[in-house]
Amino acid sequence: MESPKPILDFEKFDDGFVQKLVYDALVWSSLHGLVVGDKTHQRSGTVPGVGMMHAPIALLPTPFPESYWNQACEVAPIFNELVDRISLDGKFIQDSLSRTRKADVFTSRLLEIHSKMLESNKREEIRLGLHRSDYMLDEETKSLLQIEMNTISCSFPGFGRLVTELHQSLLRSHGDHLGLDSKRVPRNGSTSQFADAMAKAWLEYNNPRAVVMVVVQPDERNMKSLAEVETEGRVHEDGTLTVAGQAVSVVYYRSGYTPRDYPSESEWNARLLIEQSSAVKCPSIAYHLAGTKKIQQELAKPGVLERFMDNKDDIAKLRKCFAGLWSLDDPEIIKKAIEKPELFVMKPQREGGGNNIYGDDVRENLLRLQREGEEENAAYILMQRIFPKVSNVFLLRDGVYHKDQAISELGVYGAYLRNKERVIINEHSGYLMRTKVSSSDEGGVAAGYAVLDSIYLN
Ligand code: ADP
Ligand code: MG
């Protein structure tokens, strides 16, 4: 039998044509700000507008089945709602993470802030969630499986939209030759939808003089780092947060998700200070914790989703995306993972890429934990390894392209805004495809493993 023709038959494109595409892609990227800091340039990152380079990208959008795309969009608002419900269940968060707390100092510090909020009966009336749920298409089971749910500092909503527009533009110019239709690259409203949600949160706060504060890692401009918030910030009797005398309505964290963002007690003090205020936090400590890998694993246990959701269809839709997830106190699964480590990924309670354990290292680490005792077990979860389809792609970095075998991960953004009982926004809000050479285990773009991509529906 003849095998199905690939949508993008890369063999048929000669180098001259690909070079033309590359040239157009580079020009488009420069003109539209699809650029990143160029680390080889000395003044990059210190002088705005100096030392920039096109972002690492896939030259063409990666084919993605329309049915799975629809599925990922459909579950986005359900996941948003789930995060919100979890955030209201302080006991579930504390209980689920009680063992993690002993094994992981970072999670324990976050939980400490969360406990303080529970003790003082602090309520978040206006709740803003800007999420990204990541998926891979598992070839084996032919299903869309969730990698993780990000509830803090979700990266690249801006680039997501740009790379989509780049691909649409290339297809409008060269679609005939490529045999591709630009309309099959779905519209991507990530930037404007996230901005809109932040603006509406600002409106709900209802203080026209208050600002939106973006909390960043140190050395960025026109924004505040946690350490600066500690020195300049104050919570007034009525709950208002002021930083350098300026009232703050919405706090957006582009930082605060890794232990590196808390080099001293100052940063922890600032996080607590913000949490105690009435400002809308994106995310609140409860939303942040609801996105931990441990909670993801707890949710996959039988009966747990039912604690938060009533609608059986919604529960079934969420469960369909769950991969196998286990804690390390399950001896059966540990035995299996030691025998066949290539079928598992071992994950610590960290965000931001580069932390997971794969292959033979899974076996070694599990054996080490067996020797060294129980306590540290709780610092990890085990996850079924997902094996996406490998396809040929053109990766573009540093102005040059190369062809490679790659796999992709689709992130679907979701925005949620609610004021008490009134849900103001709950929608899927654009997407980001990340594509990486199939020989690499990890997936981060900023971490240098992957390139930015969009999708071509088939
Ligand atoms: P992080 O919080 O560091 O982003 P992730 O859970 O997203 O952690 O894992 C990082 C990367 O590792 C993912 O982007 C993906 O490429 C890869 N990965 C994670 N889980 C799996 C899995 N179960 N199967 C295959 N690859 C995975
Ligand atoms: Mg991730």
Image (cartoon, rainbow, N blue to C red):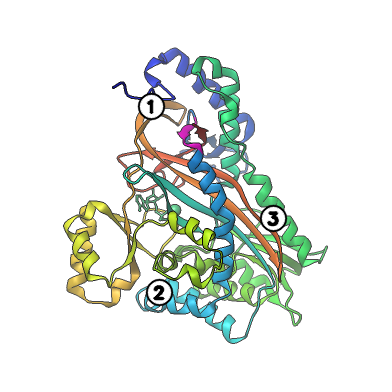
Percent across and percent down for residue 31 are 63, 29
User: Which mark is first along the chain, 2 or 3?
Assistant: 2
Could you tell me which secondary element the residue under label 2 belongs to? helix
What whole-number distance in Å separates the C-alpha atoms at marks 3 and 2? Answer: 33 Å
Percent across and percent down for residue 48 are 62, 43
Measuring 25% from the left and 52% from the top, which residue is drawn there?
343
Could you tell me which secondary element the residue under label 3 belongs to? helix
Q: Name the residue that disc number 3 marks.
A: 197
Label 1 beta carbon less than 8 Å to ligand 1: no
Q: Which residue lies furthest to the bottom in this view?
A: 119
Establish if 83 lies above or below 48: below
In the image, what residue type sits under mark 2?
Answer: Val
User: Magenta includes 452?
Assistant: no
Percent across and percent down for residue 15 are 41, 15
User: Which mark is first along the chain, 1 or 2?
Assistant: 2
Give left or right: position of 316 versus 273: left
Q: Residue furthest right?
A: 208
Q: Give the range drawn in magenta.
A: 61-66
The answer to whether residue 323 of the structure is visible from this angle is yes
- Mark in the foreground, 3 or 2: 3
In the image, what residue type sits under mark 3?
Answer: Ala
Measuring 55% from the left and 15% from the top, which residue is drawn there?
176
